[in-house]
Image (cartoon, coloured by chain):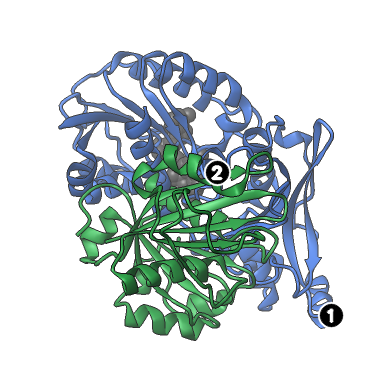
Amino acid sequence: MHEYKLMLVGFGNVGRAFARLLERKQETLRSEFDFSTSISAIATGRHGIAVDPGGVDWQQAIRLVEHGRSIDPLSTRHGLDSITEMIRSTPADFLFENSPVNHRTGQPAINYLKAALEMGMHAITANKGPVVHAYSELSALAAKKNRRFLFESAVMDGAPIFSLFRGPLPAVELRGFEGILNSCTNLLIELMEQGKTFEEAVEYGKSIGITETDPSADIDGWDAAIKVAALSTVIMGVPLKPDQIDRTGIRAITPEMIASARADGERWKLVCTAKRADARVIAKVAPQRVNQSSPLFAINGTSSYVQFETDVLPGLGIIESNPGPETTAYGLLADLINAVRNG
Amino acid sequence: MAETAGAFWIAHTYQAQSAADVKAFLVESRIRPAWISSIHAIGSLDLAGYSAMGIPAGCVVYSWPQRVFSGHRVVHTAVRSILLGETEMALLLDSSAAVLLASHIAVGRHNLFPLATFGAFSAFNHSELPLLEKLASSLAVQSPESASPNALLIEGSSLKRPVKKGTRFENAAWVHNPEPDSALAGCCSVLDALFTSGRKHGLAVDVEPGGLTLYTSLERM
Ligand SMILES: NC(=O)c1ccc[n+]([C@@H]2O[C@H](COP(=O)([O-])OP(=O)(O)OC[C@H]3O[C@@H](n4cnc5c(N)ncnc54)[C@H](OP(=O)(O)O)[C@@H]3O)[C@@H](O)[C@H]2O)c1
C-alpha cells in the first residue's frame, strides 16, 4: 500500500477541516483505494511552519492554531525563509493550498502551486485566485509534469461542477449560467427580510461566523465575481478576471426595497449571470428581484445555486444546501482520490 | 455483496409523485435520507419537501429540465459521478419513478443488496446506419457481455417488434414501459422484466428527436 505525503499550505477553517476529514477517512482510503496519507508539512500565514517528513502531529497543530499559538515547535526543520522554500525542500506527493483568496492577483497561492508542480507534486486548491489568474499556466505545467492541478471545491464547495463538465457532460457547449454563488450575501438579505437593517444583519452574520471581519469581499460582490470568473475561465473557456465583471454588491439594498419586493411576492437576490456572445462572455453580478417562478426564489440561507444553459440542456440547475468548511474538505478529498486514481 | 468498484442499482419505485412518496420508498428500501449524497431530479422539484425529509446539508441537488432530452443522460451522469468517486449514493427522480444508485463503498458500508449493475451506458448518433446495427456495434465495444440482451426496451424510435432475425437482439423479450414519458421507469421496467424471467442482461434504449441514441444496459445480480 502506498503512503502519500501531503503538504498543507493554509491551516484555517478549510485546512483544519481537511486534516480532520483525512483522519476519519484513513480506513476507507486504505480498504477501498489502497493508499494512506500522512502530513509532512503545514504552513500558515502568522502561526508558523511545521515540517516533519515522518509526519507532523497535526492534532497538536490544530490545538496550537486554535489557541492562537505558533506551530513552529512541532517542526523538525528550522530556519526556513519562506513557504516557497518549504515547498521546494520538503519531499511530498501533494500540495493542498488553502490560503486566503487574493481577488486581484491570485498570489501568493499561484507561486505555491507552481513550486509544488515543479517539484513533481499534484497541486490541489480550494482557492479561486489561482484558478482565475493562472488557470492555463498551472494546467499546462501540470500536464508537462504529468501531475494534476485540481480545484473542485473552489466554487460551490463539494458540488462537483468542474468535473461535471470534464466527465459526465463532456463536449456540451456551455452558453451561459445564472445563479446565487455567494452564500454570505444570500443569508444577509434573508436576515433583512426578517426585519434586520443591513448593519444589524452584518453584525449578526459576524457573530455566527458567516461574515468575515472585513465583509467587503462578500458584500461588494467580489467573491461572487471571482466565482463567475472561475466558471467562465474553466468551463466556458473564456478567461475573465473579477474586475472585468459588471459588479454591484448589496450595500444599497434597503429595508424599504425588501418590503416592496415582498409586497409583490418577490425577493431580492445577488444574482450572477454569464452569457456567451460570440467569442466573449458578458458577465454580471448584481442584486435583482426574482419572482416565485424563478428557481432562485427558493434558495435560502447559505445555500448556493447555479443553472447552466448548454446547447443540449436548456437548464441544468445545481443546488448545494448550507455548505461549510467540512463540505469544502470533502471536495478536496474527492480531488485527492481523483488524482491518485488518474494521476 | 458488491466487491469491486462500480455503480449499483439498489432500489426503484414507480410511485414517486411527491416527496411523501419518495420518503415512503426510502423507508421501504431501508435507506436513511442522511446516506444520500446527491439527488438528480428531472422536472419540478419540491426542495422544501426533500429538505424536511432529512437529506443532509451538503447533499448536491441537480435539477434537470423536463422532457427536452432523454432521461438516460441523467442516469449516465449519476453513474459516472459514482464511478469517479464523487458521490456515494444518488437518488434519481422524475414525475413517475425514483431510483437509488450507490457506489461499492456505500453498498459495503450500509450492507445493501444491489439488484443490478451497469454493463454499459453510452450514446451515439445513428443517422447514417440503421439503429440496431449501430447499437450492436456500440455495445460490442462498450460491453461485449451485454451485447445480446435478454430484455430490450426501445423508445423514441418507430422501430417495432419483432426484431429482425439474425441480429443480436432476436432473442430479447420486448419490454413495455408503463410510463412512456419516463426513461427512469423504462430502466425500471427492463430490470423488472429480468427479475420476472430470471434472465441476466437488459437494455433500455432511447432515441432523442435529434437522432442521438442513448442506452443503458443493466446486469441483474
Ligand atoms: N471556508 C469555506 O467554506 C471555503 C469554501 C470554499 C473555498 N474556500 C477557500 O479556501 C481558502 C481557505 O479558506 P478558509 O476559510 O480556511 O480561510 P481562513 O480560515 O482564513 O484560513 C486561511 C489560512 O491561510 C493562512 N495564510 C494566510 N496568509 C497566508 C499566506 N500568505 N501564505 C500561506 N498561508 C497563509 C492562514 O494563516 P494565519 O491564520 O496564520 O494567518 C490560515 O491558516 C480560501 O481561499 C477560501 O476562499 C473556503
* Residue B97, above or below B61: below
**Mark 1 or mark 2, which is nearer to you?**
2
Spot occupied by residue A75 in the image (x, y as percentages of width and height): 21, 26
Q: Residue at x 79, y 80 (%)?
A: A265
From the viewer's perspective, tell me whether residue B24 is left or right of residue A191: left
In the image, taking residue A272 as reference, residue A227 lies left or right, namely left
Tell me the number on the disc at residue A264. Answer: 1
Residue B91 lies, in percent from the top left, at 44, 66
Residue A21, compared with residue A95, is above or below; it is below
Picture layout, residue A155 above or below residue A336: below
Q: Residue at x 35, y 35 (%)?
A: A47
Residue B119, image x and y in percent? 37, 50
* Most foreground residue, A86 or A71: A86
Q: Give residue B182's quadrant in the image.
A: bottom right
Question: Residue flagged by tag 2: what amino acid is it?
Answer: Glu
Q: Residue at x 66, y 55 (%)?
A: B208
> Is the N terminus of chain B in the top left, top right, bottom left or bottom right quadrant?
bottom left
Mark-to-mark CA distance, 1 and 2: 57 Å
| Disc 1 and disc 2 on one polypeptide chain | no
Q: Label 1: how many residues lie within 10 Å, few (<14), some (14-19) or many (20+)?
A: few
Q: Colour of chain B?
A: green
Q: Secondary structure at mark 1?
A: loop
Q: Chain of mark 2?
A: B
Task: Provide the residue designation for mark 2.
Answer: B133
Q: Quadrant of residue B139?
A: top left
- Residue A13 seen: no
